[in-house]
Image (cartoon, rainbow, N blue to C red):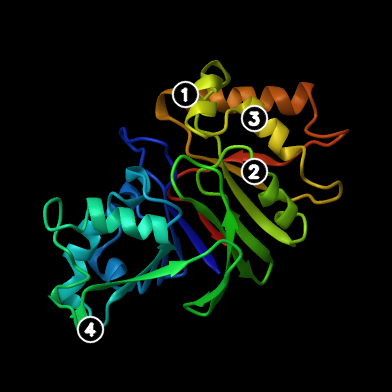
Amino acid sequence: MKVRVLGCSGAIAKDCRTTSFLLDNDLLVDAGTGVGDLTLDEMAGIDHVLLTHSHLDHVAALPLMVDAIAARRTVPIQIHALQGTIDALKAHIFNNTIWPDFSRIPSPESPFVTFHSLEVGQTLLLAGKQIEVLPAVHTVPAAGYAVATEKGYWIFTGDTEQNPALWARINQMSVAMLVIETAFSNRERELAKRSLHLSPHALANELDCIERGNNYPIYITHTKPAETDLIMAEIQRFDQTRPFGENVSHDIRWLRAGQEFEL
């Protein structure tokens, strides 16, 4: 499976695009501003969109993408999300005030998009991929995803704070790559707690939950552009001076837009 990082920033700035991943050519995980770097043909090839939650940095490009490519498609784009996320999209975006309700256009019988509810713990088969819905802890209904590949699972936590249930499940998996958010620096750790995001200090506690012997690359995503350098320096400092777990040092890297991975 090919993973293309369209966006992985916690906010916008020059060369900073918000969360979106393209898996192979037909499955989009979140629809942040990074989607705007796709060509029309690339967007038109997307059959499924998996959303982690309803916050704008994860859905901002969705209504614009649908508008750009709907006339090029003969079947609806399928949007998969928790019911709470679908409810938010219908109430606040596809509501005929902020944006047209494409689930009823051009007709309710033949719409441009269809919504499909999922639940934590569910396993889906989309675009030939086996996908498990993982728990997330955030200020709105949220989920993460584990996608099976030939090399193991590609895991994306979505936006989450401390999440014991997530690690209980991850420790049962063969992991090829973990993408985990760290939105704030340690100086903003109280804000991170209130907004249910991770700081490097909280990240260290989370990675302590990885069982000994489970070693895989860990990519940091969702850093705020103004704090990215500080966040990564703080993570590196933790990894050098306070080993994550007992005598464990993890392979921690910064995720960047434009990266591609073959799994």
In-image side of 140 versus 120 (left or right): left
Q: Secondary structure at mark 3?
A: helix
In the image, residue 11 lies at what x, y percent? Answer: 36, 35
How many neighbours does mark 3 have within 10 angstroms: few (below 14), some (14-19), or many (20 or more)?
Answer: some
Residue drawn 29% across and 56% down? Answer: 89
Q: Position of residue 74 (x, y in %)?
A: 23, 84
For disc 4, the marked residue is 74
Tag 2, which secondary structure? Answer: loop
Local packing at callout 4 (Cα closer than 10 Å; few below 14, some 14-19, many 20+) is few
Q: Earlier in the sequence, mark 3 or mark 1?
A: 3
Q: Secondary structure at mark 1?
A: helix
Residue depth check, mark 1 versus mark 4: number of the one nearer the observer: 4
Which residue is under mark 3? Answer: 202
Q: Earlier in the sequence, mark 2 or mark 1?
A: 2
- Answer with mark 4 or mark 2, whichever residue precedes in sequence: 4
- How far from the left and from the top, in percent, is residue 109? 19, 84
